[in-house]
Image: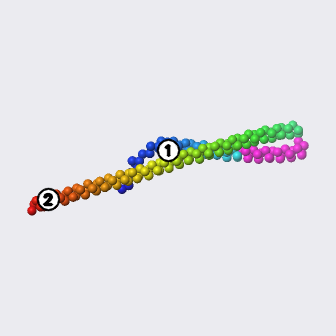
Amino acid sequence: MNPDLRRFHYSLEPLRNQRKWQLDSLTRALSKVLSQINDTKTRFAHLQETYAEQRQQIAQTQINRIDPTIYQRTLQWLVDLQKKINRIEEELVSLQSQHQKIRKDCLLQQQKVDVIESHRNDSMQSFLQTENARLANEADREWIVRHQWRKNVAQINVRQETHDH
């Protein structure tokens, strides 16, 4: 006979659930930061490509001797674009730092979940051993009672047979 696990009660279940929720929350945050990193890398690559193209064009226009005012505005635009690239690069470094911190927090939280899961499994094994022992003792008592009852019935039958004769 297998023990009924519905009788198993893990007293640290609220803590176990809380740790799992915290891990889920950290995992979502990690996913969000990774998405932001990918978006920022895409923007960064696009701006670097635009900067390289515009720099190439300005070099070509300087050879062709364009209007100095247009040339000055284009240079200023390139300087502004470089500043924007630098800001995005700083943002990317910050996001990567956040990613590393959240990843570290996820690993620590996963360890906490693993510890409590291990404790829960040990508790369940202990419960199963105790429950199996209880069921075995109960089955032994039932057998003894049935055996004693059969013995008593047999004695009663023997007395009745001897009494009838």
- Which quadrant is the C terminus positioned in? bottom left
Determine the CA span between mark 1 and mark 2: 64 Å
Residue 24: where, in percent of width, then height? Answer: 55, 44
Q: Of callouts 1 and 2, which one flags the residue occurring earlier in the amino acid sequence?
A: 1
Amino acid type of the residue that numbered disc 2 sits on in the rendered structure? Arg
Q: Secondary structure at mark 2?
A: helix
Q: Is 44 colored magenta in this rendering?
A: yes
Residue neighbourhood size for the residue with mark 2, other residues' Cα within 10 Å, grouped as few (<14), some (14–19), many (≥20): few
Residue 108: where, in percent of width, then height? Answer: 58, 45
Q: Secondary structure at mark 1?
A: helix
The answer to whether residue 32 shows anywhere in this view is: no
- Magenta: main secondary structure equals helix
Q: Is residue 17 left or right of residue 91?
A: left
| Colour mapping used in the image | rainbow
Instruction: Give residue 133's mark.
Output: none
**From the viewer's perspective, is the residue at label 1 or at label 2 nearer?**
2
Residue 59: where, in percent of width, then height? Answer: 86, 45
The answer to whether residue 67 shows anywhere in this view is: yes
* Quadrant of res 95: top right
Q: Is 55 colored magenta in this rendering?
A: yes
Instruction: Give residue 16's mark.
Output: 1
| CB under 8 Å between discs 1 and 2 | no
Q: Is residue 163 left or right of residue 62?
A: left
* Quadrant of res 145: bottom left
Please name whichever residue, 129 or 86, is drawn nearer the observer in this view of the structure: 129
Residue at 58% of width from left, 43% of height from top? 26
Residue at 10% of width from left, 60% of height from top? 164
Q: Is residue 32 left or right of residue 1?
A: right
The boundaries of the magenta stretch are: 43-66
Residue 2: where, in percent of width, then height? Answer: 38, 55
Residue behind mark 2: 159
